Image (cartoon, grey):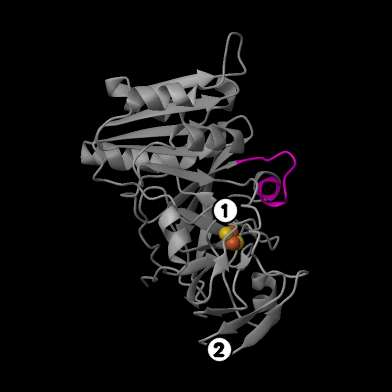
């Protein structure tokens, strides 16, 4: 059975079995999922992620790190967080090969622009996972790419064997900032040196790295700098954001009043509207909803500058409203 991609309000979930769990680096596992019950896993593009619906009730997004041409399985890389909010510790300590669970259909907030003259990939720690699917795609297309990959130590770095095989053109630059003599990557210097006509930059990693990336790519043409966050500080509440506002749902006919003590997502779920969600922090893109009317106060870290100003979609887990009423396509 071929499943369709997930749409707001239509959360496609796929039964899968854990086929293998492999140690990639210190506290980092590759988890491979195969389809169950005769389903066909939908294809995915480089940079995509899936939500894991863990048997302990937690739902969390993880980037796919296998090749997009690799049909019939999904592989994610999971670093055990310290402290864990319950997902990575469950995966490391409890999830086992043979366990049956569900995953969402793939979604992509971090797509690769395959028209780029060159792709410069910058990864910190477990931020390497979406880059691995991008590198596979770039290699398959014979495209020009360079990777800058930084970790505390070599023991923390996943995929070193695979990267070594891919480094035919000496385009893999490793940096271990916690080792003797190590230093954090100078992103302003890297971006200055790599900048050129049609060059696109991608970054995924810890918040300080991504903040530095945003600062260093400020002067690039629009759409040439791409980043994916795992977490971090949401955008600030706008001065003209309303504390209380109405939400009208065109498909269900429901009208709700959103007060300061609840989010739009919580109000929708409490009233029986089934919205996909995962991070609840505005970073995964799962709760994206179409906006028919009104002006959202965007506080997520997913939407592009163009999407933020167009006001046609919003993330309902964290965003609010600047108009007395929002009409949503749910
Ligand atoms: S649930 Fe992740 S962005 Fe809203």
Please state the quadrant of the image where ligand 1 appears.
Answer: bottom right
Q: Position of residue 84 (x, y in %)?
A: 72, 45
Q: Which residue is drawn at 37% across and 72% down?
A: 1
Which residue in the protein does label 2 denote?
252
Q: Residue furthest bottom?
A: 253
Q: Where is residue 301 in the image (x, y as percent from the top left)?
A: 55, 52
Query: Going from the N terminus, do you reach mark 1 or mark 2 first?
Result: 2
> The residue tagged with tag 2: helix, strand or loop?
loop
Q: Give the range drawn in magenta.
A: 79-90
Left or right of 1: which side holds 54? Answer: right
Left or right of 106: which side holds 113? Answer: left
Q: Residue 283 carries which label?
A: 1
For the question of whether residue 100 can be seen, the reply is no
Rendered position, 237 above or below 254: above
Left or right of 293: which side holds 324? Answer: right
Does ligand 1 reach within 8 Å of label 1's beta carbon? yes
Does ligand 1 reach within 8 Å of label 2's beta carbon? no
- Residue sitting nearer the eye, 96 or 9: 9
Magenta region includes residue 130: no
């Amino acid at each position: 059975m071929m499943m369709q991609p997930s749409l707001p309000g239509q959360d496609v979930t796929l039964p899968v079995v854990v086929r293998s769990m492999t140690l990639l680096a210190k506290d980092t596992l590759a988890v491979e999922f195969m389809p169950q019950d005769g389903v066909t896993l939908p294809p995915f593009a480089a940079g995509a992620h899936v939500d894991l619906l863990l048997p302990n009730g937690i739902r969390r997004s993880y980037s796919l790190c296998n090749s997009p041409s690799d049909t019939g399985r999904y592989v994610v890389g999971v670093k055990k967080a310290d402290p864990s909010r319950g997902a990575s510790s469950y995966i490391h300590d409890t999830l086992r090969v043979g366990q049956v669970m569900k995953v969402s259909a793939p979604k992509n907030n971090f797509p690769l622009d395959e028209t780029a003259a060159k792709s410069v990939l910058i990864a910190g720690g477990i931020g390497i996972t979406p880059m691995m699917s991008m590198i596979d795609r770039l290699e398959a297309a014979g495209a020009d790419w360079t990777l800058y990959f930084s970790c505390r130590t070599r023991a923390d770095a996943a995929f070193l064997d695979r990267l070594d095989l891919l480094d035919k053109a000496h385009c893999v630059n490793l940096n271990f900032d916690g080792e003797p003599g190590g230093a954090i990557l100078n992103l302003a210097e890297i971006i200055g040196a790599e900048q050129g006509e049609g060059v696109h930059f991608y970054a995924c990693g810890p918040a300080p790295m991504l903040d530095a990336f945003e600062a260093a790519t400020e002067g690039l043409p629009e759409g040439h700098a791409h980043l994916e966050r795992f977490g971090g500080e949401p955008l600030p509440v706008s001065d003209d954001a309303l504390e209380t506002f109405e939400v009208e749902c065109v498909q269900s006919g429901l009208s709700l009043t959103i007060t300061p003590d609840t989010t739009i997502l919580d109000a929708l779920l409490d009233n029986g509207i089934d919205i996909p969600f995962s991070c609840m922090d505005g970073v995964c893109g799962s709760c994206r909803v179409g906006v028919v009317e009104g002006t959202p106060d965007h506080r997520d870290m997913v939407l592009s500058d163009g999407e933020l100003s167009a006001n046609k979609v919003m993330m309902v887990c964290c965003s609010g409203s600047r108009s007395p009423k929002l009409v949503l396509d749910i």
